[in-house]
Amino acid sequence: MPVTLTINGKQVQAAEGALLIDVCAEHGIDVPHFCYHPGLGPDGNCRMCQVEFITERGGRLGISCKTVVSEGLVVDTNSAAAKRARASVEEMLLLNHPLDCPICDKAGECTLQNYYMEHDLQNSRQDFTRFKKEKASDIGPTLILDQERCVLCDRCVRFLRDVAGEEQLYIAGRGHEAYITTFPGQEVTSPYSINTVDLCPVGALTSKDFRFDSATWFLKNTNSVCTTCARGCSMQIQSKKGQIYRIRPRHNPDVNGYWACDEGRLNYQFVNHDRLQTPALRRGGEILPCSGQEAVSAIREMLGLRPAGKADAATARKSVILLSATATLEEMFLFRRLGAECLNATVLVARHVPDGVTDKILRRADRHPNTKGAEMLGLRVIDLTAGADASVVTGALGSDGVLLAVGFNTHISPALDAILADAKRIVAFSGCASVLTERAEMVFPGLTFAEKDGLVVNFEGHVQQLRPAIDAKGESEWRIADALLSSLLGVKPHESVAHVRKAIMDVVPAFAGVDLNKLGATGARAAAQPVAG
Amino acid sequence: MSHTIISTRFDKKDNHTLAGYLANGGYRTLPKLFGMKPDEVIEEVKRSGLRGRGGAGFPTGMKWSFVPKNTDKPKYLCVNADEGEPGTFKDQLILKFDPHALIEGIIVCCYAVGIKTAYVYIRGEYDFPIARFSAAVAEAYAKGYLGRNIQGSGFDLDVVVHRGAGAYICGEETGLIESLEGKKGQPRPKPPFPAVVGAFGCPTVVNNVETIAALPWIMENGAAAYAAIGTEKSKGTMLFSISGMVERPGVYESEFGVNLWDFIEKSTGGIKGGRKLKAVIPGGSSSAILTAEEARNVNLDYESIAAAGSMVGSGAIMVLDEDTCVVRALEVVLRFYAHESCGQCPPCREGTYWMYQLVSRIRAGRGRPEDIDTLLAICPDMTGRTVCVLADSAAIPTASYIKKFRPEFEAYIDKANPPERKLMPGGVNLEAGAH
Amino acid sequence: MSHGHHAIVSTGKPFAFSPENEKRFQELLPKYPSKRAVVLPALWLAQEQEGHLTVESMEYVAKRLEQTAVSVFAVVEFYSMFKTEAMGKHHIQICRTLTCDMLGCENLQAVIHKKLGIGPGEKTADCKFSLEMVECLGSCGTAPVMRMDNRYWENLSVEKLERIIDACKAGRDPASEDTGR
């Protein structure tokens, strides 16, 4: 039974059992808070979410995070008493706060700072020496703790205990001497530790990876997807001048809730450094830059295709198109067509990043974002993490086949390495230098997840969109595939990636039920079962 | 005093032993108790008008009746022997000199509410009271007053003595429960109240030692006899811990409704050394201070003391004589609350320390003219804003000491007229005090 | 008080309950419906055995009760009677709250300073004495009071405290000096 209550003079309906703070948020009223978090639930310690309840006996202050809505409740979130109560909490929290905002990583996204602007804006009435606590404590591989900045909201403690399942932080001591701590000599080692940095409403917990790297307000935000494992957590890529500075989770109730693992957040260094930027062709043992036109001609020559005109699959040289399971749906789709319609090619998708662990929270052992997408396209997925399926590739290549390796930016597994050693002629589509690009006769500089516009399908069949966060450093794989395809088939190339998605929806039954061009920020669930291919 | 209930046996020889207690009429109420239905016992306690003696003064029978009758969960009694409110030292006398009365009272409460396990949470510093009470519990087990089938009644009850470890806040009932559960003693937001969700997630009664110790008398003499003592809303008697600048400090029992100063003077022999009365703190350090005139004109009962703007609290009466410095008294009280704040809620965690810093500065002669008003302005921001009332407990004395003795505070600040450096009655010059 | 864990370091000395404490520990377990509830009693046993709580003893208690070490540490740091460093053989706790302050507890502090040369939070070089000014001991009727050697010393005067300290220094039982004011 829904209940009716009055918030700031407006009657609203809410679900029975709902928390007032959530109901307020649903109606556009953001009641200030430090300790409450929708992913952690209410705790009630910070007293910041006080509102005034209007009763027959007059006004009464109470915290909205612990208030379950009830029929006839009358609430004023902005009464003078409520505002004074919150301003006073803000003042109390600032009494012994070090106010080192100019050197604090949290500045610009600090809740304490923001609420000061909203509530207080007074000079401090406190003119004592501020209480000293430990600063810049190294509390583990990912985190730095500043006890002076801490507002003791307990979020980090509750996250590690209640969500990550590893109680590694606690508030010790009491009164104004209370402080966040690990056990003496122990560290925070949770694979989800950096969520505590996001949760921290102030700059008490900072990420070693991001510390002192950039003022937060200079960063550009791009909604994208983590490509580190088959979960595909919704992420926000934060970048500046073509470099990624930080990756943070975005709330997605269907995929990752509010969280992300540390590995996923930190898996971006290869995007920023040592990127291949121009096509290159091996001539007389030396690999030298070439033009795009030269590159396409070289490929046609390698594949035994006539220099111009339509393809003739029957006369083409035998080849294998080996796509990484990190490739996007569009790349897989176009390369599949290329292989099936223009070339004498076997198209395979490879899992090559070594398996991680599957845990009860987010992480999946399969560290490829699009294994499921490949299966749904009907592509054969082979396992090159351990080498079991390497013979499938070598067999298909035969003695003089051409290997087109697409999307292997990182992790050249021993099995893949063996295939490369065996292959006579290799064309690499890769954004990063590796043994693959060293052995290749022809290298197209590919893109990383941070530059692509493309789709990935997580292990549960949830489709999400990668969006380009930084300018492309190489050439789009799907465009190259599409260029080859159109020239060989003599058809018009796709105008945009949206047209490729339209084609996928038209051709692949597994994606018929979902509009791939209207996925929104959190994506959509496609048909759960892969279609046999 | 005309009526003594709790303290009757305090000075009886060997009363702390089972044999001594039995000789003094102890455990006599058990046959009557086990002959009654549990609900009848609750009704009897309700009719007696007994109110909690720990500080809040909540009606005891009503508290018990909030415990759900039909529940699959076990129920618990937590006896609050944390006795932390400064000025209070009455419960230790019960633990030391009449421990079996507490055990008998525990049996009454547990039988009425349907409880099989009672935890007696005693503050960690009380080495001797813990030892005395533990010995009494052991003897009660040995002689069939605790354990299985108490005195052939079919009623089972276990009593566990649990030692605190130094934290005032564990005297707050949900702080006590958290501490009993092995955690930091941080009070819980309410609701839910302990009667519904208390210790170990189960319905729990939390009662003060003295409250429980009053039960055997009520069972033996009847609710009507108890209710006949005292006033309309303050029935029965209470142990008052009287300390400070009086000739004979100690615990004195009185029925409610007597004149406060008369009671203090008659019990203790009045102010030490024939000096003059300055003020009385009637209900522990968290209660508002009463001036000498107010103390002379108020009766000692819940409603009269409340009407005078203070509270009976835990019955801890502290007497300040003419030489006692109110500014120093407030500094010491605030230092206590800053030290004892559990640290959950910012208004308390930060506010108590801030107020202590301000008063400390004033007392040290470094106060600024605006400090007094700043202190007064902080008080409402610390009242009714937090999980428990510790913040209020610091704000109440602050506001009342300043309101009633403002010139004393101003004298420390007014640099043109340097204050006479006060000596505390103990004789040490505070300015030279080695901090 | 330390504000962080760097002050508390492992002694490298392993800890386990003595046979007698193990027996007491086993007796405690059935008295509570949860293992966690035994944390305070078990810490008391550990502290009585070692004199203070070491990194090893806190880890031991946590392990025996299936709690995380950090949660046990937080409990230790919350309660003023749990100590993470060694106190003197005679740990003197002088009450400093209202009634004791009115009745001259600062004189007692001065006595300790004069006779032993230590202030609050300090320990004599021979580790025989340490001093702590504590909040209300709940014995205001016999103020000023102190707690030492697991008992209270009440109605203290400067002279009485001097006699008690002298007895301790001489290795005599100070209880004989607990007379009068």
Image (spheres, rainbow, N blue to C red):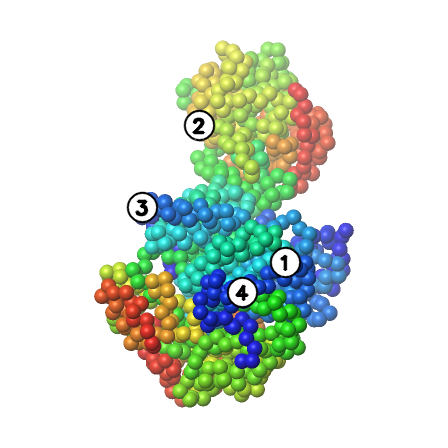
Disc 4 to disc 1, C-alpha distance? 15 Å
What secondary structure is found at the residue carrying circle 1? Answer: helix
What secondary structure is found at the residue carrying circle 2? Answer: loop
Of C141 and A198, nearer the camera is C141
Q: Picture coordinates of residue A282 (x, y %)?
A: 45, 22
Of A296 and B198, nearer the camera is B198
**In the image, is residue A238 above or below residue A482?**
below
**What type is the residue that disc 1 sits on?**
Phe
> Can you say which quadrant of the picture contains the N terminus of chain B?
bottom right
**In the image, is residue B269 above or below residue A73?**
below
Q: Picture coordinates of residue B194 (x, y %)?
A: 60, 58
Which chain does tag 2 point to? A
Disc 3 to disc 2, C-alpha distance? 51 Å
**What type is the residue that disc 3 sits on?**
Lys
**What type is the residue that disc 4 sits on?**
Gly
Tell me the tag on residue B310: none
Q: Earlier in the sequence, mark 4 or mark 1?
A: 4
Q: Residue at x 67, y 30 (%)?
A: A528
Mark 3 — residue? C13
Disc 3 to disc 1, C-alpha distance? 55 Å
Tell me the tag on residue A434: 2
Q: Are marks 3 and 1 on the same chain?
A: no
Q: Which residue of the protein is positioned furthest toward the front in this rendering?
A: B23
Q: Residue at x 42, y 83 (%)?
A: B247
Mark 1 — residue? B34
Q: Are marks 3 and 4 on the same chain?
A: no
Mark 4 — residue? B26
Q: Callout 2: 10 Å neighbours few (<14), some, many (20+)? A: some
